[in-house]
Amino acid sequence: MHNEALEPKITLNNDVKIPVLGLGVWKASNEEAATAVGMAISHGYVLIDTAKQYGNEAGVGFGIKSGLTIAGKNRDDLFITTKVYSGDQGYQASIDAIDGQLERLQTDHVDLLLMHWPVNNLYNETWRGMEEIYRSGKARAIGVCNFDVERLTDLLEHATIKPAINQIEFNPLIHQQAVVDLCHEQGIQIEAWSPLGNGKLLKLPLFNEIAAVHKKTAAQVILRWAVQSNVIVIPKSVHEERIAENADIFDFSLTADEMNQINQLNEEHHSRWYNDYQWYGNPDGDPNRIMKA
Ligand SMILES: NC(=O)c1ccc[n+]([C@@H]2O[C@H](COP(=O)([O-])OP(=O)(O)OC[C@H]3O[C@@H](n4cnc5c(N)ncnc54)[C@H](OP(=O)(O)O)[C@@H]3O)[C@@H](O)[C@H]2O)c1
């Protein structure tokens, strides 16, 4: 199915266009990711967000291949994002890792390569490696994740190429206003991870009240709020009805008053694990695991 709203519409600072909504696949196994990506492509999704850390690049690659065949589309119709694994940080290590990632994804380039985490003492060198990957054409755009004001300022002082994106935890309870403001000033697009608070926000009364007014669901209201806040969203689901539901947010608008009410929910802080997480390990799976098709 073609969904015009899911086509690339936002222009990044290197003129590459990216969709405003895509599919996330964190915590999906290779098998789940393959099925979800295939379903998403047939529902018109263009943007798929994975990471070596998730251990499911091979499943995503398989889902892309089968999804494109079923939908009668080409690789160039998609916008594939993956991330530099924290265990691959450093100039040479990040360069050495990309070919294996592309092989698992069954493609010769990604549309966006993000640094998954600002590993202290390494992120500037890693960025230098990512600039090389960008110049080689193996990534059409490069960006970062989880950079706060201090680290982003430092990166900008060392970088030759400005990040196109900062993918951060962002939802009605977590606005991260300081880093969002810096990104706006610098022309760096914000992309929200866990836009639904990993599903935990869906029960909050306000979203359900607003959803009832628009004959929509709480998930749709939250995603619509992010999109109206000029933020790209990548909600994750492995269920077809939810994949379709999450993309069906372009036929209604939240009023200024509703946006304001949702904005009042901001508590600013991250989810509890965030500040303690080291990201050197790979708790979510073995990235080298090859999916058996
Ligand atoms: N860069 C980073 O550091 C970073 C960190 C975290 C996440 N991410 C990316 O961001 C993506 C999204 O974040 P996330 O996966 O943490 O959380 P999320 O998208 O906020 O929420 C996903 C959860 O909500 C459920 N869900 C999705 N749509 C739903 C709906 N319409 N109704 C009810 N439940 C629904 C999903 O369950 P089912 O799957 O069972 O439907 C899943 O449990 C990730 O998948 C990943 O690609 C990046």
Image (cartoon, grey):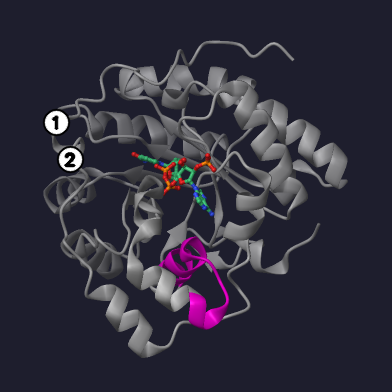
Q: Amino acid at mark 2?
A: Arg
Residue 85 visible in image: yes
64 and 283: which is toward the camera: 283
Percent across and percent down for residue 106 are 69, 26
Q: Quadrant of residue 21?
A: bottom right
Q: Quadrant of residue 31?
A: top right
- Image position of 47 with respect to 183: above or below: above
Residue at label 2? 272
Q: Any magenta on residue 226?
A: yes
Q: Any magenta on residue 108?
A: no
The quadrant of the image that shows the N terminus is bottom right
- Image position of 150 with respect to 219: above or below: above
Q: Residue visible at 34% across and 72% down?
A: 206
Label of residue 276 in the image: 1
How far apart are the two marked residues, 2 and 1, measured between alpha carbons? 8 Å
Q: Residues within 10 Å of mark 2 (few under 14, many from 20)?
A: few
Residue 13 visible in image: no
Cβ of mark 2 under 8 Å from ligand 1: the answer is: no
Considering the whole magenta stretch, tell me its main secondary structure: helix
- Image position of 103 with respect to 6: above or below: above
Read off the magenta span. 212-227
Nearest-to-viewer mark from 2 and 1: 2
Q: Residue visible at 42% across and 88% down?
A: 255
Name the quadrant where ligand 1 sits.
top left
Residue 113 as seen in the image, left or right of residue 146: right
Element type at mark 2: loop
